[in-house]
Image (cartoon, rainbow, N blue to C red):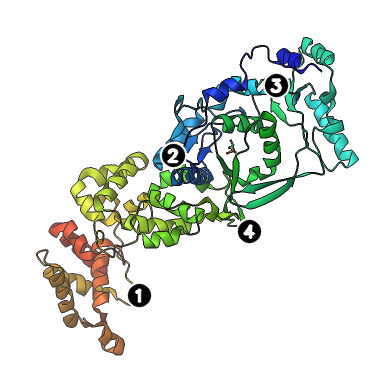
Amino acid sequence: MDNKKLAELLFPHIDKTPDYYEELYPERGLPEGARVTRFAPSPTGYLHIGGLFGALVDILTARASGGVAYLRIEDTDKKREVDDGVSAIISGFDYFGVEFDEGVTGFGTEKGAYGPYTQSKRAEIYQTVAKSLVEKGLAYPCFCSAEELSELREEQEKSGALIRGYFGKWAKCRSLSLEEIEEKLAEGKPWVLRLRSGGSEDKKIVFDDVIRGKIEMPENIIDEVLLKSDGIPTYHFAHACDDHFMRTTHVIRAEEWISSVPKHIELFKACGFKVPKYAHTPQVLKIDEETGDKRKLSKRKDPEAAVGYFVEGGFPKESVLEYLLTLINSNFEDWRRANPRADISEFPFNLKKMSSSGCLFDLVKLSDVSKNVISVMDAHTVYERVAQWAKEFDPEFYEVFTANPEFSEAAVNIDRENPKPRKDIAKWSEVKDYFAYLYKPFYQPDYTLPDNISKADAAAIAQKYLGEFSLADDKEQWFARIKDMCEPLGFTPNVKEYKKNPEGFKGHVGDVSTVIRIALTSRRNTPDLYSIMQLLGEDEIRARLSDALKSFEE
Ligand code: GLU
């Protein structure tokens, strides 16, 4: 077979050789040990939480080694693509402040010297490499129709063949002569380009997965499709060409690709490319609510699979990243304890410390992490973040919350900016309800009392407090005043005393405070009541105590 002639016949429009691209995309000249990683999503119009997880691993790996992380858009599968699916991915990353050093930066924009970073713009590169493979006799055109291929599958099933697919004796087009090929081309028959696999069924390949260690698998023997009939590459071929010419050192990707590694190693070698290091990250799992079993987070079933869920819910980006890091590296939590306020970019990330089994994504744990994260934010930041979130997702609350910024900032500052801040808020969408009693349009009085306090006693407390409270008090005086109210009302200011002799009193100072709290906020539990009263102001306090009194007297 005259391979050169065949290559010319198949790719008459290609006038470059791979050497041209070798020069165009030279070795990066980074310091020894620097890692070049990439995140390579398909533009399906949505960023999966597992994608954010993967991108973080890419970026941390690159940063920890002084390397480069880039974003490549893999849009060769037109079926999976949605209009402008890139923007959704980019805006997802923007929200989380995740920035790549190179690659696609927006719809139709990119930065870096190894582009284009969108596969659909790289057809010439793939075809140049494809042409060289044909010249070397390592690839051939296959004219089999969809029907022929399904017949082949059926036959293989019938014969009980252990390995299924287009290979060896099943690969009809593998042995076509140049004349036969010319004839089919002249007839205008569509063709795909296949690898002429040199693999052997009884040989094994071994590779060292950075996360999983040594993995041994049978060699690839399938004549895999490299280019589809429209000249667009398959994932496998694009992976080899792109990761070579973009000079990726570490291919970090989801574990579902492990089984393709033999194919990929064969491809890299066939193309004369150095095989990169592979690291297959664990899947992001959840406990299925119905079955109680672990399963993959699913785009279809689980709203939290899409990062938009966290954006809309108002989880701060720091919380989500912090939580993902606890999943990513087993030593992250120790590091966090030792460095409570450090930025996560300072965390000494190590790919080898990644678990190889699935990571359980647990919304409850995320909420706990988030409460910690929010509790150490200063009031101004919280105010700004709540406002920013509400502007987009709850405009009605935005209007009310931002009408008096000083008031709202003081509200979110209650029990904050101190060594033991309150840890109540996990996401910005909770703030409206959390502080509803501070904003008239959202306040719905509810004077339900705990069982141990009678309405008559509550009325007496509200009545007395109406005549006693003073906003001029400092916090100590404020509390002393409440204590002083206790005895005349039949309560004790001393909790210990109450516990010793519960029959002797109607209750203790805690119960008196609870009544005041309910009267003023309709809650049994709030942040510091003294601060809340300062914010409500004299008139509002009077009005609320009177309202509550009426209700207690009913
Ligand atoms: N486009 C592939 C995917 O979305 C990327 C796999 C890889 O990182 O190589 O699954």
In space, the residues marked 2 and 3 are separated at their CA atoms by: 34 Å
Q: Disc 3 designates what residue?
A: 229
Query: 10 Å neighbourhood of mark 3: few (<14), some, or many (≥20)?
Result: some
Quadrant in which the N terminus appears: top right
**First of labels 3, 4 by sequence position:** 3
Q: Disc 4 designates what residue?
A: 291
Res 147 quadrant in image: top right
In space, the residues marked 4 and 2 are separated at their CA atoms by: 33 Å
In space, the residues marked 2 and 1 are separated at their CA atoms by: 50 Å
In space, the residues marked 3 and 4 are separated at their CA atoms by: 44 Å
Q: Disc 2 designates what residue?
A: 93
**First of labels 1, 4 by sequence position:** 4
Secondary structure found at label 1? loop
**Residue nearest the observer in this picture, 142 or 425:** 142
**Relative height, residue 359 to residue 550 (above, below):** above
Res 185 quadrant in image: top right
Which residue is at a point 40% across and 59% down the rendered structure image? Answer: 336
In space, the residues marked 1 and 4 are separated at their CA atoms by: 38 Å
Q: Disc 1 designates what residue?
A: 451
Query: Which amino acid does the dot numbered 1 rest on?
Result: Asp
